[in-house]
């Protein structure tokens, strides 16, 4: 199976586990969550199952396999470490999606992908609730490892990893929101924010996978935790910057969430770089556009031009290449087998490939 | 020491533990939290320490003592179960305050007590962040029990109690928000909501206290967990209804959060009762007022009159008396010592005393 096939198979495994975990929860609170996850429409009616990309959950499964977890078989009697890995993957997807639900409210995005955002359908008050509830479910997914036999040490270590990632995520979201209203943001500040907000969740996905494959004491292979943890941090950071890049220069249709992010003056790395480094006249022009309450959609083409002229597009591609290099180096350091390595390289390619080759 | 003195002493213990736990966290994310907790002003400058009521944390400490935890002494070498109880109390206060931070945004309350609500100062996006971060801290407070020697079983059981309460809280908040836009709410629905939203947190406070006093396996005395858990549920529910009551007929100055809640059409128990049971003409009049986008402040006196005429004020006092009776009965069932019982009775008196005597 090629690495893209691996990713699709892992996504499907995570999707199945997510559905199983949510099964039987029928209160309206969970209908909102099922809507966000793409399973029902805004009236709570099931929609035809579609292939979902569950990237962070898949990363967790890849890490578990790299750390030696038994691969799942089709029998009902799955090995314990695989069960622990899929529950960890479920938890990390719920964590990621809770953060999406809240950030759509925070950024005022009316859409999430091709459909209206949860808060846009049910209002911001219920959006906050649905996110909070999904956050609680993320942790209950980890607890359910204990219900089916994992040691309290293992459960507790996994929960702590999840909660520490949450706190970093909140710290990153704080910076991200502040940057929105602040012109003087340094590229160093931006990188710190992106690591906190996006890198930490992917790093946690990797660590949880390794810990699932570890022994009952809840630890994991230290060399893997270091090496692959670093890989996750760099990959997650790169994913955020690749998103920034796609908002400005992505191929195909731009979704309205991306466009909205631009209009709402989210500081992306290219913009931060230009405001910090471009010539005074360009900085002034860009500064004026970003000092408006929202960016005039008509100015967006000019924003792109300016970022080209200032070398900020090129700079961003360079940062992505560097992160890709760092991620590769971290893979080498972790000394995983060739199969696992190919899987992770496929992930990098999938996430930032075309931008940093 | 009388029971009021007990409550003040326990609140002070919780306050000290909260401050210790937050010490050293200096990122702006934590400044917002410190503001909410009453420690700094909106510029991050410390304000003179004031006595804070930490009711839910105090309940947790009371429960721990009722379950036989050693009372704290002034030496630095505190007994383990007391340390576990104060960390649990810290966690439950952080959970409660996270829910306040989010509900102020959800209800659009500009004020929290005598000062502007957190989101009013920093905006709703940062309000969501600060709440999410405080929620993560609540759980990290429980983890820190493990850092200082508690067993993983105990840590894990405490975390699960906290997370299950969170999910109930979200389910309750969901109903509360739906009720706001819906005229046909039954008193039974309301009671379910109040149990979920407010009872569950107080019940969790009680259970955490008992578990802190329990053995390393993370369990607790079953009779106490049942009896005092039931007590907590009834007390917490009564606290919510007493708040509803105070919004309408409280003594002294009405704070603007309370007034705002009324204007924003939060369905309180007396209103729900009147809409369900009053004579058609009264139901129509009240229905018209609650069908407006917001309630005209000038109509509020008329709302009070109508609720008197329909017997809904009296009904609410009856419900509070019943809850008080249930809470008392649960205390009897749990067979705690007289000292502990006096402490809990003081709590009931403090929370709903004047309304249900």
Image (cartoon, coloured by chain):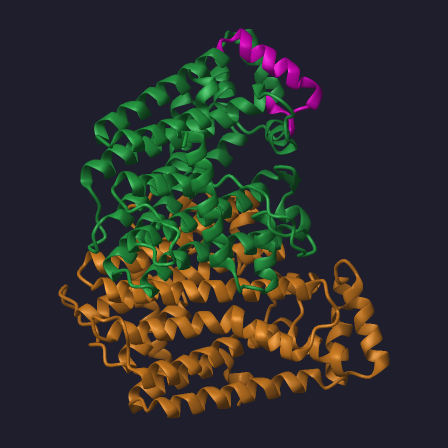
Chain colours: A green, B orange
Which one is in front, A64 or B66?
A64
Which corner quadrant holds the N terminus of chain A? top left
Q: Is the residue B320 above or below the residue A177 in the image?
A: below
Residue B27 in sight: no
Magenta stretch, main secondary structure class: helix
Is residue A306 a member of the stretch shown in magenta?
yes
Q: Which residue is drawn at 41% across and 62% down?
A: B163
Q: x, y percentage for residue A154?
A: 26, 55
Q: Quadrant of residue B53?
A: bottom left
Q: x, y percentage for residue A330?
A: 27, 27
Which one is in front, A280 or B187?
B187
Q: In which quarter of the image is residue B247?
A: bottom right
Q: x, y percentage for residue B320?
A: 56, 84
**Range drawn in magenta:** A290-311
Is residue A161 a member of the stretch shown in magenta?
no
Q: Residue at x 46, y 78 (%)?
A: B233
Q: Which residue is drawn at 55% across and 88% down?
A: B321
Could you tell me how many numbered marks the image carries? 0
Which one is in front, B180 or B346?
B180
Q: Residue at x 66, y 79 (%)?
A: B187
> Could you tell whether B84 is left or right of B198 in the image?
left
- Residue furthest to the right: B281
Q: Quadrant of residue A303?
A: top right
Q: x, y percentage for residue A64?
A: 30, 43
């Amino acid at each position: 199976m090629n690495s893209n096939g691996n990713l699709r198979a892992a996504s499907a495994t995570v999707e199945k586990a997510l559905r199983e975990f949510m099964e039987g929860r029928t209160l309206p609170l969970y209908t909102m969550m099922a809507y966000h996850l793409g399973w029902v429409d805004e009236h709570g009616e099931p929609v035809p199952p579609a292939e979902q990309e569950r990237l962070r959950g898949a990363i967790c499964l890849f890490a578990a396999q790299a750390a030696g977890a038994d691969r799942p078989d089709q029998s009902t009697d799955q090995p314990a470490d695989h069960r622990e890995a899929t529950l960890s993957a479920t938890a990390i997807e719920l964590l990621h999606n809770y953060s999406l639900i809240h950030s759509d409210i925070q950024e005022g995005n009316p859409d999430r992908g091709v459909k209206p955002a949860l808060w846009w359908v049910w209002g911001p008050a219920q959006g906050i609730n649905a996110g909070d509830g999904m956050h609680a479910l993320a942790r209950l997914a980890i607890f359910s490892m204990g219900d089916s036999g994992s040691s309290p040490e293992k459960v507790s270590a996994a929960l702590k990893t999840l909660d520490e990632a949450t706190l970093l995520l909140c710290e990153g979201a704080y910076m991200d929101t502040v940057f929105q209203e602040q012109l003087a943001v340094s590229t160093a500040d931006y990188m710190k924010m992106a690591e906190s907000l996006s890198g930490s969740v992917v790093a946690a996905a990797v660590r949880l996978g390794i810990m699932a494959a570890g022994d009952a004491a809840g630890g994991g292979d230290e060399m893997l935790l270091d090496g692959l943890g670093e890989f996750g941090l760099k990959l997650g950071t790169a994913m955020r910057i690749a998103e920034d890049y796609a908002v400005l220069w992505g191929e195909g249709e731009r979704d309205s969430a991306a466009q909205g992010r631009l209009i709402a003056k989210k500081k992306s790395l290219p913009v931060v770089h230009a405001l910090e480094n471009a010539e005074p006249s360009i900085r002034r022009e860009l500064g004026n556009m970003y000092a408006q309450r929202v960016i005039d959609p008509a100015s967006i083409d000019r924003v792109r031009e300016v970022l080209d002229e200032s070398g900020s597009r090129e700079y961003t591609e360079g940062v992505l290449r560097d992160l890709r290099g760092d991620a590769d180096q971290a893979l080498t350091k972790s000394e995983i087998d060739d199969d696992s390595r190919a899987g992770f390289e496929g992930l990098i390619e999938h996430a930032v490939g075309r931008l940093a080759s």
